[in-house]
Amino acid sequence: MISATPSVFDVAVSQSGSGIDPFVDRHAPDSTHTYYGAGKVALRDGLAGLVDSGENVLVPAYLSPAVVEPFHDLGLESRFYAVEETLAPDFADLESRIDDDTVAVMSVNYFGFPQPGLERIASLSDEYDCYHVDDNAHSPLSVHDGTLLGTHGDLGITTLRKLLPVPDGALLYCTDDEVKSQFSPSSLAGRSGRIAASDCRFVAASVAERVLETSPSLHRSVDAFLSDGADDSSSVDPSGRYEAAKVPMSRFSAAVADAADPDAIRAARRENFRAWQEIVDGRDDLTPLFERLPEGISPYEFPVRASDPEAFLAELEDCGVVGAHTWPILRQSVREDETYETSTRLADELVALPVHQGIEPSAIEAVGDRLRR
């Protein structure tokens, strides 16, 4: 069985203890980075000294609901801009929304790939004298044009729990000199110095996940129970999720990050991405979002557009793939606005397949054999 969620047993550990820090230092030497429990909280701290209440930030409409909560926390208005089928910004729509009160434009590196038009977003930010926020939540280990994703803007973030089997963890990158000088970390920055009850619960849940893998039918029943209503955007509480994330990075997450082997993790994820690519290439009802895997990219998932997403998800589940999902759950205001029709269609059609380092390529190949029958 293939699970979309890695367990604590599935982290590649470096024999030299290289960890995340040296990797970041190597690929983003001109930026500073600070650890947080969550990327949204990191983003709030990064912008706090740069903005005034009443200003606005432009973000892509194709985005999970809670991402804009740190802006609202700072008294900022979040303005959504439309995206193209490729996930590039609709630049005409984006530019039409910029005014004298626009303080920042956010780009999003979806699934660990640079957002198409990343360089143009940076140019527009310079032209209109606003900050460029490089949201790289999906993949801390992706490098584009020799530079770590998340550090292509004036400030940026990445999220460790999307890379490692940890309960939390994120980094704030500051690359611009003014951003560095104005940055004042809150009490939520840094790493917790003690083992918390939440660390113990996470480890226990990961052990339980490993046990459930021995019984696919039980695993599916538990998943169905826990996720009841999760696909309904009305059930999402963005503000509650944001407030709950206001804690420093856990000690457990810090220990895993320090022990991780970035090179091994990148290699495993790339190999699993290619394994899915070979399976999907033979199907007329599926279209990969990315036709190729560029050098330096560490994918978060394998995203594919399906002509019948529900049928494909059911087919995957019958083949032992648990946790494949459509993405993202959009804010209701986005779904109700025809301007963002492309974002809504993508959210309905796109199915994300797991590629994390806890999966053996042979397991994906075996799924491919069953899907072809």
Image: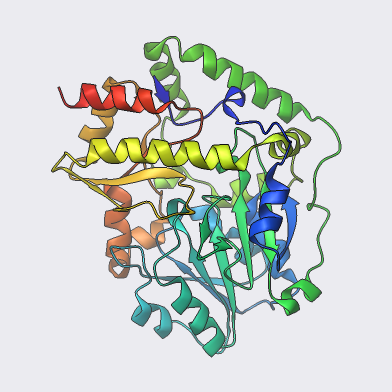
**Extreme right residue here?**
193
User: 56 and 291: which one is in front?
Assistant: 291
Q: Residue at x 65, y 19 (%)?
A: 204
Q: Quadrant of the N terminus?
A: top left
Examine the rendered structure and indicate whether residue 76 appears above or below residue 279.
below
Residue 297 pos. (x, y %): 47, 52
Q: Name the quadrant containing residue 319.
A: top left
Q: Quadrant of the C terminus?
A: top left
Residue 4 in view: yes
Q: How was this image coloured?
A: rainbow
Residue 21 pos. (x, y %): 72, 49
User: 198 and 142: which one is in front?
Assistant: 142
Residue 227 pos. (x, y %): 44, 30
Q: Name the quadrant containing residue 343.
A: bottom left
Examine the rendered structure and indicate whether residue 156 appears above or below residue 5.
below
Q: Total number of numbered labels?
A: 0
Would you say 29 lies left or right of 84 here? right
Q: Residue at x 65, y 70 (%)?
A: 75
Examine the rendered structure and indicate whether residue 208 appears above or below residue 115.
above
Would you say 20 lies left or right of 191 here? left
Residue 354 in view: no
Q: Name the quadrant containing residue 247.
A: top right
Would you say 176 lies left or right of 5 here? right
Residue 98 pos. (x, y %): 48, 84
